[in-house]
Amino acid sequence: MTSTQINYQELAEKIKLWGQELGFSQVGFSDIDLSSHEQALTLWLENNYHGEMDYMAKHGLMRARAQELVEGTTRVISVRMDYLPTDAKFARTLKQKDHAYISRYALGRDYHKLIRKRLKQLGDKISEYCENFNFRPFVDSAPILERPLAEKAGLGWVGKHSLLINKNAGSWFFLGELLVDIPLPINEKSTNECGNCVSCIKICPTQAIVAPYVVDARRCISYLTIELRDAIPEEFRPLIGNRIYGCDDCQLICPWNKFAKITAEDDFSPRQSFDDVELLTLFNWDEKSFLSKTEGSAIRRIGFQSWQRNIAVALGNASYNEANIQALKHNLPNAQAMVAEHIEWAIAQQLTKLAAITKQQAQQEKNQRLTARLIRSVEKGLPRDA
């Protein structure tokens, strides 16, 4: 159809139906005006809250200007895809300090390729309907403020933890975008319903949410375990616990996630028992095993060195176990300098815990001896017929 023959309201309904058929949980439409976000973005960058993510600063305000990213863009089609697996084992894994906690979004197949492929298919469907139509799909692959765009498209509101929250589906979902050049009708922007709740701010292990809606990535466990390629600052290592890839705490505490939907995508189900695996099992992988076992997973992109670094920190935080020390010492000689530093730190943590246990046992033995001596003393003072 030519542009003059298209009923864009009807087309919008068709797009939502096609999106549902492709597995998207929700589809919405927005214009591209994000000028109201430019000041906050500039301030965030000036405060260096992006840490070593140089690509954030490189593109600057382009993130708020979709038309500069893809010429001719007039609308953004935002999509949502739920990823929460059945029996996500949140609390149990976090409490098992000898087990690895991996952010729930990374348990299964890498979502980037899956969603981008579906977005491409959605764009192709629209192309069959429109004679002149251009589109570009993006999934965390472009300098664009996807959450404010999704908010404008009615998919939810940006919460105080900076993630998108949907009133009927919580926040356990991925986002993706199609930048298009057709005048689709836009949806009504979602209303922010966080209210006075500050649970996500209070629960953050490293206090990375420095103000409502403002996250200092340099303090965020997801940044420290995924984006950062250098040494993790020592002040944060004990706070990371057994989280070796990402962190879900701010979502776990969010009251809106009682409405979260279980994913219908089998590809998002846990692989390699990542939802229930011991730290030592993962730490014993060599690089070849890591690359093989994380093939098709988002985890693979952090590389083997960061993987070893993260697990070393988690082993340092685990309860004392001689097997932990032996594994750390075994990997130390062949570790690169950055990883070796974390292994040495972890060994020191384990030895400190051993010293504390030894001291406690010595005190208990001392108390037992004193008690026995007191009993003997009392018994000696008692009459023979007592």
Image: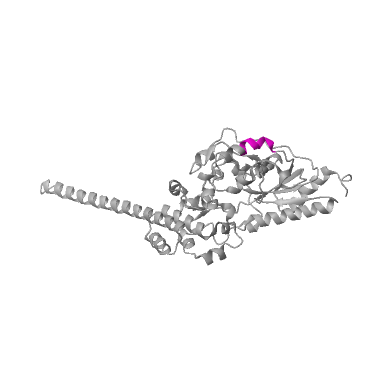
Q: Position of residue 104 (x, y in %)?
A: 57, 52
The answer to whether residue 268 is visible is yes
Residue farthest toward the left in the current orientation of the protein = 384
**Near-viewer residue (370 or 111):** 111
| Span highlighted in magenta in the image | 34-41
In screen coordinates, is 255 left or right of 114? left
Seen at 79% across and 50% down, the residue is: 134
Q: Is residue 148 magenta?
A: no
In screen coordinates, is 161 left or right of 11? left
Dominant secondary structure of the residues highlighted in magenta in the image: helix
Q: Position of residue 135 (x, y in %)?
A: 76, 50
The quarter holding residue 347 reads bottom left
In screen coordinates, is 114 left or right of 365? right
Residue 18 drawn above or below residue 335: above
Q: Position of residue 228 (x, y in %)?
A: 53, 51
Q: Position of residue 276 (x, y in %)?
A: 51, 58
- Tell me how the rendering is colored: one colour
Q: Is residue 39 magenta?
A: yes
Seen at 47% across and 62% down, the residue is: 281
